[in-house]
């Protein structure tokens, strides 16, 4: 089986990186990680990569005079490692238009909200302040505008009345860890294609037909 070559870009803890590492350890999983790139020297994800025996490179953006030089360096590292799909996994630096376009439809991101709601930072706090019933997470192809691009997969997470930003974050991250390896699997197996600003699944039965209601209506079980 040919496995899709992943380059995973991180800035911090790397729990999503870990789920990809774990998925790729299964020989039947259709992808493998060929390089991990961090823009921060203190990213714990670098230790996760090392523990897994994966090549990892730290490219500290602060040591570059400008964004173009930083992104050219990252681009060359990804190319040198044969990367076919870039997975942004808690990579907390905006990427320039040139870099994004060079990886168009070959770079995905995970974001802790139901996009297009709550782009940017502090998504849990903002969702709680607004009193919305559902929060969640999204995997999407990356476009130059921040937290924008064709959506591959989302998980909707009901907000509990006693949720704090921390409890909500923990629950949503649990779903992030479920959907990231699945989204990569869909891409690697050719189950999805991009059409305009949408992602189309070849098999429409993969899309569930039932909705989720919160709070539970009294006349439904
Ligand atoms: C994740 O919750 C991810 O959704 C978020 O950063 C966290 C990284 O966690 N990404 C963004 O906010 C991007 N806009 P991790 O380092 O443990 O995977």
Image (spheres, rainbow, N blue to C red):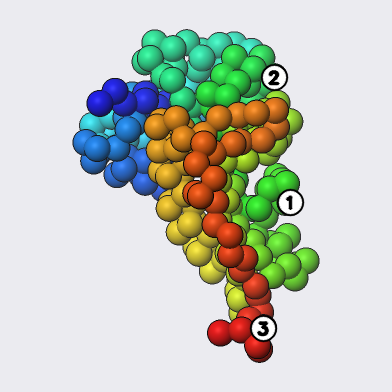
Location of residue 204 in the rendering, given as x and y in whole percent from the top left corner: 54, 45
The residue positioned farthest toward the bottom in the image shown: 218
Quadrant of the rendering where the N terminus is positioned? top left
Cβ–Cβ under 8 Å for marks 2 and 1 = no
Give the label on residue 165, or none. Answer: none
Q: Mark 2: which secondary structure?
A: helix
In space, the residues marked 1 and 3 are separated at their CA atoms by: 25 Å
Q: Residues within 10 Å of mark 3 (few under 14, many from 20)?
A: few
Does residue 109 appear in this view? no
Give the label on residue 217, or none. Answer: 3
Residue wearing tag 1: 117
Location of residue 35 in the rendering, given as x and y in whole percent from the top left corner: 36, 24
Q: Nearer the N terminus, badge 2 or badge 1?
A: 2
Q: Mark 1: which secondary structure?
A: loop
Residue wearing tag 2: 97
Instruction: Say left or right for 192 vs 164.
Output: left
Instruction: Say left or right for 74 vs 51.
Output: right
Q: Mark 3: which secondary structure?
A: loop
As displayed, is residue 59 above or below residue 183?
A: above
Total marks shown come to: 3
Q: Residues within 10 Å of mark 2 (few under 14, many from 20)?
A: few
As displayed, is residue 195 above or below residue 80?
A: below
Q: Nearer the N terminus, badge 1 or badge 3?
A: 1
The residue positioned 41% from the left and 19% from the top of the image is: 83
The residue positioned 41% from the left and 48% from the top of the image is: 15
Q: Nearer the viewer, residue 175 or 64?
A: 175
Instruction: Say left or right for 53 vs 110.
Output: left
Label 3 near ligand 1 (CB < 8 Å)? no
In space, the residues marked 3 and 2 are separated at their CA atoms by: 46 Å
The residue positioned 50% from the left and 64% from the top of the image is: 171
């Amino acid at each position: 089986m040919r496995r899709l070559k992943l380059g995973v870009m991180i800035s911090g803890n790397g729990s999503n990186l870990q789920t990809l590492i774990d998925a790729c350890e299964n020989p039947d999983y259709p992808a493998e990680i060929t390089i991990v790139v961090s823009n921060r020297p203190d990213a714990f994800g670098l230790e996760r990569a090392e523990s897994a025996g994966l090549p990892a490179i730290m490219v500290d953006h602060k040591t570059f005079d400008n964004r173009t030089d930083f992104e050219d360096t990252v681009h060359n590292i990804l190319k040198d490692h044969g990367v076919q799909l870039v997975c942004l996994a808690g990579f907390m630096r905006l990427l320039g238009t040139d870099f994004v376009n060079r990886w168009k439809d070959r770079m995905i991101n995970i974001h802790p909200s139901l996009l297009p709601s709550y782009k940017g930072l502090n998504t849990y706090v903002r969702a709680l302040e607004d009193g919305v019933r559902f929060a969640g997470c999204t995997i999407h192809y990356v476009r130059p505008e921040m937290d924008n691009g064709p959506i591959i997969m989302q998980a909707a997470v009901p907000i509990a009345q006693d949720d704090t930003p921390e409890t909500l974050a923990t629950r949503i991250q649990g779903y992030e860890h479920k959907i990231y390896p699945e989204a990569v699997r869909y891409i690697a197996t050719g189950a999805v294609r991009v059409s305009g600003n949408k992602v189309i699944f070849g098999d429409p039965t993969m899309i569930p037909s039932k909705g989720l209601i919160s709070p539970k209506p009294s006349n439904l079980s």
